[in-house]
Amino acid sequence: MKQRFLFLGSRSVAVAVACFTSPAYAVTLETVLQTTLERNPAIQEAKSGLEQAAGQRLVFRSVAWPDVELGVPAGVQGGHRAGESGTKGFGVGRGVLTQTLFNAGLPASLRRGDVEVLIAQQQLNVAVVDQLHAARLAFYSALYYRSLESIRREQQRRLQENVTTQRTRFEAGLADKSALTSATVQASELDTQIESAHRAYLGVQLELAEAMAINPAKASLPEPEGELQSIPVRVDLDSETAAALQRRADLRLARLFVRAANEDQRIIAADYYPAVTGSIHGEYVPVTGIHRQGSTSRTQDFIGSEIRERAAYTWRVIDNGKVGGAVLRARSAREINELTCRKLQANIPRDLSHIANYLKTTEIREKSFASAATAAEESARTVQENLASGLASPLEYRVTQNAFLGTKSGLLQAIYQHNLAVAEWDRATGRYFQFSEDTAQNLH
């Protein structure tokens, strides 16, 4: 089973920090996805499950294989019969070969063993998709909260400059104390928002470390490189929906569960049908005159080597519900799996339609906030210049600064939501297993 995962092959870059602090672990999105794929505990566990499934496949297939038993009884025989010598040693070689000639459950057992491996493979695929998606979202969230903290610190710096200006004007007798107090309060109000953004950033750093199997007690937390960017995504809903129905790992897994339940039901129901088993028994006797256990005459002794063949025919007619009840339970499990598969398949078009609409909404919001942020920044700059010359009031300055902070934060949030929507689109369409250069350009 061949597949390609959504990651690039670049390596992480460590940035050294002076003094006694730990070096910052700078990572790109490609590094995060690569490391997650190689070291994530959930993915490693799914890989172990795939190896176990290979062994379980042998168990299912063993029904069709012959059963061979070998034995070498040996010992010492004593006592006398007429015409016999005294005590002597002996050895007998015995072999039994049993082969199933007909069993109605045999084809189902062979198919079930193959499905067991396919299920484990798809479970690995689902684990990979879930963990890569979670790591990607954590990376975007880290960029968002770090940028949000930076915006609010920059805004606080500007407000602190206003506090300095108002203090100078107050000391010069050009402004009253209320203006200085108001400017100071406004600047300090951002402390809570900055701290909140910083805590959120540390939280998503821990999520990144968990996805990448990094122990925070032994290594520094990963620092995401770059800034959030937004690139318009062209969506062909019909073709993407058709492709998602074919390549979604969770949908493939649901279909395999249906197949497995169907084969389990056939295996159980096979007990209603007759079974034929053939066997060959052979004995090799290197010496003669050795008594069989319980023999009373020479005609019952081991005369020489021999081979015997036979066939056994069995048919369970009455089972008192033992087989029938198990078949009903297996049928119930199959019907539940079929219902789950149909619901999942029916939800995919609706989910993709919802995400496609949300992508358009985030692009519109981003353009709107981009225009508003440009105008708010120009207005804030003009009022700041007028405030220094006494042409604008502190109230006007605070209003324009708050408007600039709001629009700039809104623009950042719109870009962040757009990135999350793109990641969700890739997950919903199964693109984590359809990596190409085109999709790589849309990931940042």
Image (tube, helix red, strand yellow):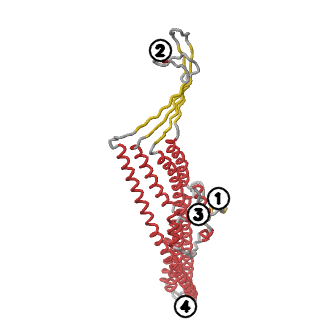
Q: In the image, which is nearer the foreground, mark 4 or mark 2? A: 2
Give whichever of 277, 443 is nearer the camera: 277
Q: Reading the chain from its start, which is encountered first: label 4 or label 2?
A: 2
Per the image, label 1 sits on a secondary structure element best described as loop
Q: Name the residue beneath numbered marker 3.
A: 6
Q: In the image, which is nearer the foreground, mark 3 or mark 1? A: 3
Q: Give x and y (percent) for residue 56.
A: 51, 45
* Outermost residue, bottom side: 391
Q: Name the residue beneath numbered marker 4.
A: 391
Q: Reading the chain from its start, which is encountered first: label 3 or label 4?
A: 3
Amino acid type for the residue under numbered disc 3: Leu
Q: CA distance from mark 1 to mark 4?
A: 50 Å
Q: Quadrant of the N terminus?
A: bottom right
Q: Reading the chain from its start, which is encountered first: label 2 or label 1?
A: 1
Q: Name the residue beneath numbered marker 2.
A: 297
Q: Name the residue beneath numbered marker 1.
A: 20
